[in-house]
C-alpha cells in the first residue's frame, strides 16, 4: 500500500469513559465529500487492534484496547490506501481524527478472451469445402442470410444474378434459371421435385432454417449434383438447413 498522511488529527479533552476510543470521518481529498464503506483499521505495528466501516456520512468509531501509540489505515476500492501518522491515545482518551483519501484509477487484472471457430457438422463439410475451393458457384452463408432478415427464401435468392421468379396461379413465385427454365433443387443433398407451378422454394424451407445455399449454372454443377434430367441444363440450387446443427 502507498502510505499517505492523514491531514487533521484533532485531540479533544474528553470526559472519563469506559474505555479509550478513536472516532472521526473519512472525506474525499479536494471535495471534502464523505466516503462511505471505507474499512478503517487501528494498528499497533503490524497487528490490527480494531476495525470499523464508515457510514454514509463517512463517520466511524473504534474502541481502543489500551493506551498506546497507534496508526489508522483506510482502504476502499477506487481510492488510494491511506496510513496515518502516529496517533497517541492515553488512558480513557477519546480521540477525533479526520482522514482525507485520494481517488485513483483501479487497475484490474487483464481479461483474456479466447474463441474457437464454430465447426460445422460433418454433413455440411461439403458445402464449406466447395465454398472455399469452387470458383464458379455462388454461395450464400448463414451470416449473410441472417443479415438479409428476409421473410421468404425467395427473397434471399432474388438477389442472385441469373435467377428470376415468375408468378404462379397460386399467387406464389416459381424460381427460374437462365433462359427461363427450372433448375434442379436440392435440400441437404437430396433432390426435391418441384412439381411445376404447384411447389415453390418458399414451400420447401424458410430463411431461418438455412445454413447455406449454393447456386450453379448448368456448366458449373458439381458432379454430385448432376442428374440425367432436363433440369441439369438449367443449373442447380442446393440448400442446406441448420436443423441438425
Image (spheres, rainbow, N blue to C red):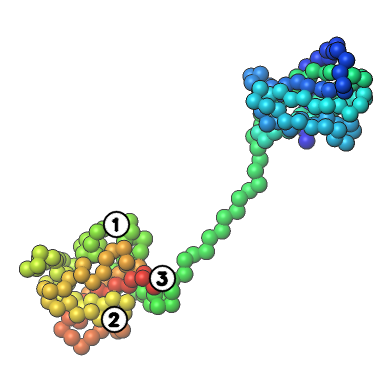
Which residue is at a point 66% across and 18% down the rendered structure image? 32
Residue 89 on image: x %, y %? 89, 21
Q: Label 3: state its secondary structure.
A: loop
Mark 2 or 3, which is nearer the eye? 3
The label on residue 245 is 3
Residue 45 lies left or right of residue 115; in this view the side is: right
Under tag 1, what secondary structure?
Answer: helix
Query: Helix, strand, or loop for circle 2?
Result: strand
Q: Residue at x 32, y 72 (%)?
A: 240
Estimate the spatial distance between the alpha carbons at disc 1 and disc 3, rounded to whole Å: 21 Å
Mark on residue 148? 1
Residue 177: x and y, percent? 17, 72
Q: Quadrant of the C terminus?
A: bottom left
- Is label 1 in contact with label 3 (beta carbons under 8 Å)? no
Quarter of the image where the N terminus is located: top right
Q: Residue 166 versus residue 51: which sits nearer the camera?
A: 51
Mark 3 neighbour class, 10 Å CA radius: few under 14, some 14 to 19, many 20 or more? few
Question: First in sequence: mark 2 or mark 1?
Answer: 1
Tell me the residue at 87%/21% (across/down): 18
Q: Which mark is residue 76?
A: none
| Residue nearer the viewer, 233 or 98 | 98
Mark 2 and mark 1: Cα distance apart in space: 26 Å
Q: Earlier in the sequence, mark 1 or mark 3?
A: 1
Q: Which residue is mark 2?
A: 190
- Whole-Å distance between the Cαs marked 2 and 3? 17 Å
User: Looking at the image, is mark 2 or mark 3 earlier in the sequence?
Assistant: 2
Q: Can residue 113 be seen here?
A: yes
Amino acid at each position: 500500500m502507498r502510505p499517505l498522511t492523514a491531514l487533521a488529527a484533532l485531540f479533544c479533552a474528553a470526559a472519563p469513559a469506559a474505555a479509550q476510543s478513536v472516532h472521526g470521518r473519512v472525506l474525499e481529498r479536494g471535495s471534502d465529500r464523505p466516503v462511505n464503506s471505507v474499512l478503517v483499521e487501528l494498528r499497533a505495528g503490524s497487528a490490527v487492534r480494531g476495525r470499523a466501516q464508515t457510514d454514509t456520512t463517512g463517520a466511524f468509531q473504534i474502541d481502543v484496547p489500551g493506551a498506546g501509540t497507534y496508526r489508522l489505515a483506510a482502504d476502499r476500492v477506487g481510492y488510494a490506501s491511506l496510513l496515518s501518522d502516529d496517533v497517541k491515545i492515553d488512558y480513557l482518551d477519546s480521540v477525533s481524527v479526520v482522514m482525507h483519501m485520494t481517488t485513483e484509477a483501479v487497475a484490474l487484472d487483464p481479461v483474456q478472451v479466447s474463441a474457437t471457430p464454430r465447426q460445422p457438422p460433418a454433413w455440411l463439410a461439403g458445402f464449406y469445402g466447395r465454398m472455399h475451393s469452387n470458383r464458379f458457384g455462388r454461395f450464400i452463408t448463414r451470416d449473410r442470410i441472417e443479415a438479409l432478415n428476409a421473410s421468404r427464401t425467395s427473397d434471399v435468392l432474388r438477389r442472385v444474378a441469373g435467377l428470376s421468379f415468375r408468378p404462379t396461379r397460386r399467387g406464389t413465385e416459381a424460381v427460374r434459371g437462365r433462359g427461363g427454365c427450372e433448375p434442379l433443387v436440392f435440400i441437404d443433398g437430396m433432390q426435391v421435385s418441384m412439381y411445376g407451378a404447384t411447389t415453390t422454394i418458399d414451400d420447401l424451407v424458410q430463411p431461418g432454417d438455412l445454413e447455406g445455399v449454393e447456386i450453379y449454372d448448368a456448366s458449373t454443377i458439381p458432379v454430385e449434383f448432376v442428374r440425367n434430367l432436363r433440369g441439369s441444363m438449367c443449373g442447380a440450387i442446393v440448400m442446406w438447413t441448420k436443423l441438425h446443427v
